[in-house]
Image: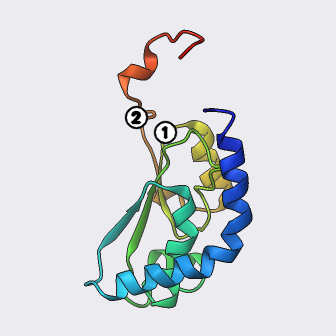
Amino acid sequence: MTYVMPLVYSVASSVHPYLANIHVSKMKRYFQALPKPDIVVSLVPFSNIALIQAFEEIEMLPSTNDSSELMEPSKPTVKHLTILTDFASSTAHPWIQDRRQTVCVGTTQAYSQAMDFGIPKQAIHHLSGMVVDPKFYRPMSREQ
């Protein structure tokens, strides 16, 4: 299965530009039909940028990356919390994509990436590690 994932990511990133507008449009319609949430939690890296664009377009996020607006938005905004379920952000798994994200990270590398990207320190929550099911600690045979 591991040899298939790079192909899946390659295809996903190739078609993303063609589907991005559809993705953003569907998210806008979804969130406009509901009462404004206080927070939206993301566990999928590919949805973050579409969420951010949709929230901007329906004015649930400030439309600027100016750090003064990060702390005191001029209008009611929704908090976008991203919980990284990978050890770091990468091209294949682009978790950290916007300075307005609040991120929960489980590794020092991901924490450093968020800081280097410009996410304010108070919006980065360094957890005590990755959440991993104990079954992944069991030794595996080559056949598995």
Number of marks in picture: 2
Q: Nearer the viewer, residue 62 or 133?
A: 133
Residue name at image x 66 percent, y 49 percent: 8
Q: Which residue is mark 2?
A: 131
Secondary structure under badge 1? loop
Q: Is residue 91 visible?
A: no
Q: Position of residue 132 (x, y in %)?
A: 41, 30
Mark identifier at residue 106? 1
Q: Position of residue 22 (x, y in %)?
A: 56, 81
Q: Position of residue 47 (x, y in %)?
A: 52, 65
Q: Quadrant of residue 135?
A: top left
Is 74 on the left-hand or right-hand side of 17? left
Looking at the image, is 104 positioned above or below residue 128?
below
Residue name at image x 67 percent, y 68 percent: 16
Q: Quadrant of residue 19?
A: bottom right
CB within 8 Å, label 2 to label 1: yes
Label 2 vs 1, first from the N-terminus: 1
